[in-house]
Amino acid sequence: MTNEKYSIESLKKQVQKTYPDMPEYIQALEDVAEDVLAPESSDSREVLEQNWRALRYLSEPDRIINFRVAWVDDHNRRRFNRGYRVQFNNMLGPYKGGLRFNKALNTSVLCFLGFEQTFKNSLTGLPMGGAKGGSDFDPHGKSREEIQRFCEAFMTQLARHIGPDIDVPAGDIGVGSAEIAYMFDQYRAITGKFSGVLTGKHPVFGGSCFREEATGYGTVYFAEHLVKHEFDETLEDKVCAVSGAGNVALHTAEKLLSKKAKVIALSNSKGTAHFKDGLQQDMLERLKKHIGKRGDLQEFAEQQDITFKQDKKPWALHPQLAFACATQNELDENDAKELIENECLAVFEGANMPCTSAAMQSFKKSPIIVAPSKAVNAGGVAVSGLEISQNRTRLRWQADRVDKKLQEIMHTIFEACCAHGKTGENSAIDYKRGANLAAFEQLSEALRWYGTA
Ligand code: NDP
């Protein structure tokens, strides 16, 4: 059932009245609306209107917080950046979502990430709302001391807006365990409290085992289910290309190696490292150390005599499975065409929204299966949810307990995608539709109980 009044266009128009210049956010909203407002999802005018109203309600962020972060550089000069926290929606639990330090960060990117996070957190089945924040501070080229001073200044501003029952941030691009430690320390100093106000902490001061690994490992657990379901095969010997060389990419590669897959590429914003004979575990260990010390992939490739293809992406290397684990909109229409021509089997969105809308349209017309970020990379926030539980009970779970729970959650998410994503054509699964509808179902149910829609 379609109706102009309750269409994707009318929804976009209303949102754009308040947020006229937010392309990334509109892209994310459209992605969800395409499934929620599809004729197959709304078989009567009444249901269509209900879904449209619920989505309109969910498209409005609760709060966009914006502040100046003043810090001092190594030359004793006062510098400043913009800091943000978008508390998107807390219907299902306290706001939860990462902090990103990246020079291209703006409110459009944060609204897209906060909206995505609301849906992703709903998929985990854990009581968490959605948020995202960060700063346009660029950590590249800064000293460790400058980063520490920036993190402290950032938390000085953010502290008044967060709390274990209010909003629990974590890491994201440019924010790893070191930055989380600096911010946690500052929060402790400001409030005088040792509380579970951030996740992604080191296990010695309240972090969960496996949080660092969780997003990448969860991505591979999801991939394992999909490959079994779709092709009745395992990951063994599958030729995999991974984009990025950060937290998600490196842990995706690590878990792929443990499943005996062949990882032929990693990348960064400068180009692609091509491991012709497949990445080996000992080399990955060295690379993790190198990146951990703020080293660069290209520099590492040169030191280790690995081919580094400047300005090239990994998708031209004929992978059977593509893991997009770097950043939003990194995989465009040309990349999609290349993957289709080279008969890639599936694309896994380890990063948030790494495929452009045009790439998604190309995939839709091809046999390639796309596993969407909301589902694929939900393992990170799921283990963050487990970290919150551990902090609440003042207990520390053993690694195997966390890993087992992560595997269970990823399996449940996979099943939810299958249950909601059946298209009718030979019961083929549309995983994007499955993830969007499963997450929307929880959120719209909460709305009904709150009496809001
Ligand atoms: P990191 O900062 O650890 O790593 C990001 C990596 O991506 C870096 O190697 C960076 O290279 C590379 N990169 C950035 N821009 C581009 C580009 N345009 N083309 C190619 N490579 C690029 O971030 P994370 O690994 O934590 O996050 C990656 C993605 O996963 C993001 O979309 C994030 O939102 C998402 N995510 C992360 C979670 C987590 O737990 N960390 C949880 C869920 C989602 P360079 O250094 O050259 O910029």
Image (cartoon, rainbow, N blue to C red):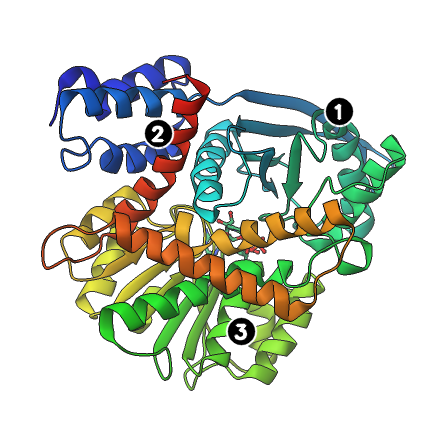
> Is 372 on the left-hand or right-hand side of 108?
left
Residue that numbered label 2 is attached to: 26
Amino acid tagged 2: Ile
- The N terminus, quarter of image: top left
Taking 206 as reference, is 275 above or below it? below
Taking 275 as reference, is 418 above or below it? above
Marks 1/3: CA–CA distance: 38 Å
Label 3 or label 2, whichever comes before in sequence order:
2
> Is 7 on the left-hand or right-hand side of 266?
left
The residue closer to the viewer here, 294 or 346, is 346
Taking 242 as reference, is 110 above or below it? above
Instruction: Identify which residue is drawn at 25% across, 64% down.
Output: 339
Name the image quarter holding residue 220: bottom left
Say if disc 1 is inside 8 Å of ligand 1. Answer: no
Viewer can see residue 313 = no
Amino acid tagged 1: Arg
Q: Where is residue 419 shown, x and y percent of the image?
A: 27, 52
Residues packed near mark 1 inside 10 Å, few (<14), some (14 to 19) or many (20 plus): few
Circle number at residue 254? 3
Q: Where is residue 145 shown, x and y percent of the image?
A: 83, 48
Circle number at residue 160? 1
Residues packed near mark 2 inside 10 Å, few (<14), some (14 to 19) or many (20 plus): many
Residues packed near mark 3 inside 10 Å, few (<14), some (14 to 19) or many (20 plus): many
Dot in front, 1 or 2:
1
Circle number at residue 95? none
The residue closer to the viewer here, 255 or 26, is 255
Amino acid tagged 3: Glu
Marks 1/2: CA–CA distance: 30 Å
Marks 3/2: CA–CA distance: 34 Å
